[in-house]
Image: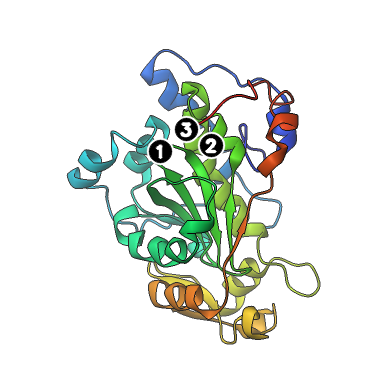
Amino acid sequence: MTHEDAPTTPDLWNVRPVPEPASLVEQDARTDEIFDRDVLSPAPEGLNLTPMGVGLPVTQEHVDRFTPVLPRSVLHIWRRFGFDGFSGGVFWITDPLLWAPVVQAWLDPVIDQMPFTDTWHCLARNAMGSMFLWGENTGHSLEIDPVYHEVIVDQLARRTFADPGRREQQGRVAIVHAADTGLTTALDEHGRPLPPQALERLGPLRADQVYGFTLPPALGGALSVDNLHIIDAATYLTLQAQQTTITVCDPVGDSWNEIAPVIHVDPTTRS
């Protein structure tokens, strides 16, 4: 898959972003084009990423709550698909209201270690429970990886959030990247992604389920499809947050002054 200015792919940040269209209709058309290309097109891994058609619709409560804090690109995807799953639950567009307690369970233990503070909302997640968050003031600045027990900071997204074009692109990336990791995350001992194996062996997921480890890797369990089962998402992920120490990863960190010129932004940029 290819992504538009994906913050987690440095080479894509080595070009200046294409300016967002001035027309809102054209902005929505660009969102559709990128989503269709990067999510709905047949994937090389053999999965056809198609909507399951089981998702809940976006309510007026969601519109009222999140219109002030989410980019138009995310709201457009919500209107188009609702909170739906794709390809048997490989990834899901999530209801941030329902996922707030799980996000809190992972962030509360490490809040003092974070390089910045914000209010985060879960926009998407994959079959293994990785969560892709949106900060109201920092954009697509955090991911939670329960398999490796990490909270991953994205300084590139945070530092460029003030640019309106980047903000819209980050909204698309937050959801499209979840689809990508649904196919490629959590490798077994042979370097093969676990979600496609789990889908074939265990079957599809509901919106409230994940593929969870019978014995978590943090406690010595194997990264193997033989160690996976279908389990309630909220219960499993909340317990996972309590199993062992959560690591905060900040890949950019103090290297911002060196990276900023590469992605064509002012090194003094702050969120």
The residue identified by callout 1 is 74
- Picture coordinates of residue 228, whole percent (x, y): 59, 81
The residue identified by callout 3 is 32
Query: How many residues crowd around disc 1 within 10 Å: few (fewer than 14), some, or many (20 or more)?
Result: many
In the displayed structure, 246 sits above or below 75; it is: below
At x 66% / y 70%, what residue is drawn? 194
Nearest to N terminus: mark 1 or mark 2: 1
Q: Residue furthest right?
A: 190
Distance between the alpha carbons at the discs numbered 2 and 3? 24 Å
> Which residue type carries mark 1?
Val
Q: Secondary structure at mark 1?
A: helix
Which corner quadrant holds the N terminus? Answer: top right
Q: Secondary structure at mark 2?
A: helix
The residue identified by callout 2 is 158
- Picture coordinates of residue 2, whole percent (x, y): 67, 38
Q: Residue 104 versus residue 222: which sits nearer the camera?
A: 104
- Picture coordinates of residue 67, whole percent (x, y): 28, 35
Labels 2 & 3 near each other (Cβ < 8 A)? no
